[in-house]
Image (cartoon, rainbow, N blue to C red):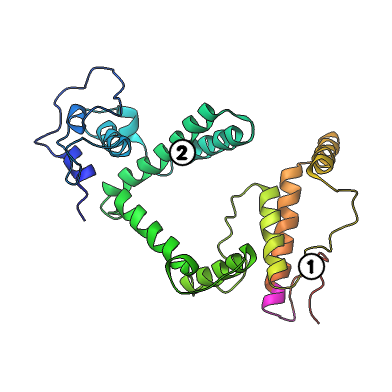
Amino acid sequence: MTNPLFSSARTDATRPQENPAPTVPRAADTVADLGSPLPAGVGPAGPTPLETLIVTVARLRAPGGCPWDADQTHASLVRHLVEETHELIEAIEDGSRDDLLEELGDVLYQVLFHADLAAHTPEENFDIQDVAARLTEKMIGRHPHVFGNVTLHSAEEVAAAWDSFKAAEKPGRTSVLDGIPTGMPALALADKVLGRAEKIGLLEADAGFPLPIESEADLGPLLLAIVASARAQGLDAERALRVAVRDLQSEIRGAEHPAADAFDAGIIALPT
């Protein structure tokens, strides 16, 4: 695997021997200005802003670059990825166009940073081009109604087909719960697990508990009141919900693979 956008930025022959002046590269600057020759495939008009950013990331991590960047690992970057993701969410919900533009860039930077780390880790040995190729293959494979001869007429049909394609790609999964990130916040995790239970018929989508909720404007204060009540009693609402979700997951797995000692927390009705 050779990616000129990375390999050319890291060769001994072209690596600057001294740190560059503390200026911020502009998108219009050539890759050579960052200490690298023009990558193969870049036209005479020069690199695109994305190509310049890719080489900028590599330059920061190269010897003679930024010591902080050079010291990072996938694990050490996790908290930064989480923080940048939350900032992007905030920009989507409350920010301006400029906020969204900036925060999308920060998340993109995290992706490029991880890809550059992998490109220079022998046991990983992939780069951003491999990431893009894998994603393109997946998106085309999961959209045969766009790129193939399959006909799907509604968003619901597309969602169902997506689940089928995803299951075919992951034949080793034995539960509808497999693949759900356990590190999700408890509220998002609960929503995801309940959705999976609905997909296999263990729960009805409209058979919720009888609470006076008709809109998110009703729901928000109710959730806030629950958290406030928990705090007043010295309880951890996040942990309590996570424990309840784990119990629900155990019940779902018991329903998928019935056994005499199947766990029953009374959240759903297990088959008898």
In the rendering, at what x and y percent does residue 21 appear? 23, 17
Q: Amino acid at mark 1?
A: Glu
Magenta region = 254-260
As drawn, is 207 to the left or to the right of 195? right
Provide the residue designation for mark 1: 204
**Quadrant of residue 133 in the image?**
bottom left
Residue beneath the point at 72% across and 44% down: 238
Q: Residues within 10 Å of mark 2 (few under 14, many from 20)?
A: many
Of the residues under marks 2 and 1, which one precedes in the sequence? Answer: 2
As drawn, is 247 to the left or to the right of 158? right
As drawn, is 167 to the left or to the right of 220? left
In the rendering, at what x and y percent does residue 247 appear? 73, 61
**Dots 2, 1 in contact, CB < 8 A:** no
Q: Residues within 10 Å of mark 1 (few under 14, many from 20)?
A: few
In this rendering, the answer to whether 189 lies above or below 94 is below
Residue beneath the point at 60% across and 68% down: 153
In this rendering, the answer to whether 171 lies above or below 216 is below
Q: Secondary structure at mark 1?
A: loop
As drawn, is 228 to the left or to the right of 51? right
How far apart marks 2 and 1 lie (CA) works out to 36 Å
Confirm whether the magenta stretch covers residue 232.
no
Q: From the image, which quarter does the N terminus lie in?
A: bottom left
Q: Amino acid at mark 2?
A: Val
In the rendering, at what x and y percent does residue 170 appear? 48, 70
Q: Is residue 127 visible?
A: no
Provide the residue designation for mark 2: 107
Front-lying residue, 170 or 212: 212
How many numbered marks are there? 2
Front-lying residue, 241 or 136: 136
Residue beneath the point at 55% across and 62% down: 179
In the rendering, at what x and y percent does residue 243 appear? 73, 54
In this rendering, the answer to whether 137 lies above or below 253 is above
